[in-house]
Image (cartoon, rainbow, N blue to C red):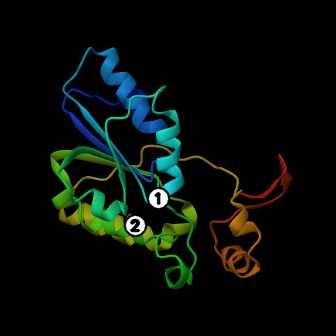
Amino acid sequence: YLSTLDLNNISSCIEICTWSGFIGKYLEYKFKKQWRSDYHVTYNDINPEALAFYQKNAQQIQWNNFLLENGQDAIQRRKHDLILCNPPYIPRKWSVEDNAYEWLELAQNILKNLDTALTPNGKLLINFSSLSMEIMMPLFEEMQEQWRSIQRVATQVVPLKVLNILNNPVWMKELQANPWLIEEKWVWVHKYW
C-alpha cells in the first residue's frame, strides 16, 4: 500500500512503534525521489534499544526526529497528515497488569484520539492481528460511524512466531481458544498461523 500512497497531501508523518524505522525511511526515500524537501518524518518507540539503534546508525541514515516515549504521548505533540503504527497486536488478557503496552491499549488509545492527532484529511495506517478481531472491530465500527471512513488495505496470513507468546503456556491456551488462530501441522517450521 505504501508504494502506491499519494504523498501530495502529506508533509508530516509519525511512525509509532518504529523499532527499525523501515517504514518511515521508505517514506523519506519516496519524498526525496519526488525532489521534495517540505516533509517531516518523526520516529517513535518506547524501547530504549530502538533509540540505541538510531544512534548507532546515525552516520548511515539521516533521521529527522526520534521520540523515546509512549506512542500515545508522541501523537499528541502535533497533528500529522499520516500516522503509521505497528503496535503490539496479539491479545493477552492479563498483560496490562505487567506490561501496559503489550496488549491492545496503544492501538485503542490511538484510535480514540485521532481527532487531536491527525490533520483534517489525515490518514492512519495501523497493523493488527485477526487474533484481536473481537476487540478491535467494534472500535473500528464506532470510528467509522463517528468520524472517518475505514478501509481494509490488505490481509495476509502470517505465522505466530513471537517466542514470548509461544513459550507462555497460559497465553497459548488462551490463544488456542481464539477462533481466528489457525493450527497447522508444522508448515515452514511454524505450527500456528
Res 163 quadrant in image:
bottom right
Number of numbered discs overlaid on the protein picture: 2
Pinpoint residue 160: horizontal percent, then vertical percent.
69, 58
Proximity of marks 1 and 2: CB atoms separated by less than 8 Å: yes
Residue 32 position, x and y percent, is 32, 19
Residue type (three-letter) at the residue carrying disc 1: Pro
Does residue 109 appear anywhere in the picture?
yes
Amino acid identity at mark 2: Leu
Residue 19 in sight here: no
Q: Which residue is mark 2?
A: 106
Location of residue 165 with respect to 45 vertically, above or below? below
> Residue at image x 27%, y 46%?
123
Residue 171 x, y percent position in the rendering:
68, 77
Residue 13: image quadrant is top left
Return the residue nearer the eye: 115 or 70: 70
The residue nearer to you, when weighing 99 against 160, is: 99
Q: What residue do we see at 18% from left, 32% from top? A: 9
Q: From what the image shows, is residue 189 above or below residue 35?
A: below
Mark 1 lies on residue: 87
The relative height of residue 122 versus residue 69 in the rendered view (above or below) is: above
Task: Determine which of the numbered discs, if any, sits on residue 131 in the image.
Answer: none
The location of residue 105, given as percent across then percent down, is 41, 72
Helix, strand or loop under label 1: loop
Closest to the observer: 3 or 44?
Answer: 44
- Mark 2: secondary structure: helix
Q: Earlier in the sequence, mark 1 or mark 2?
A: 1
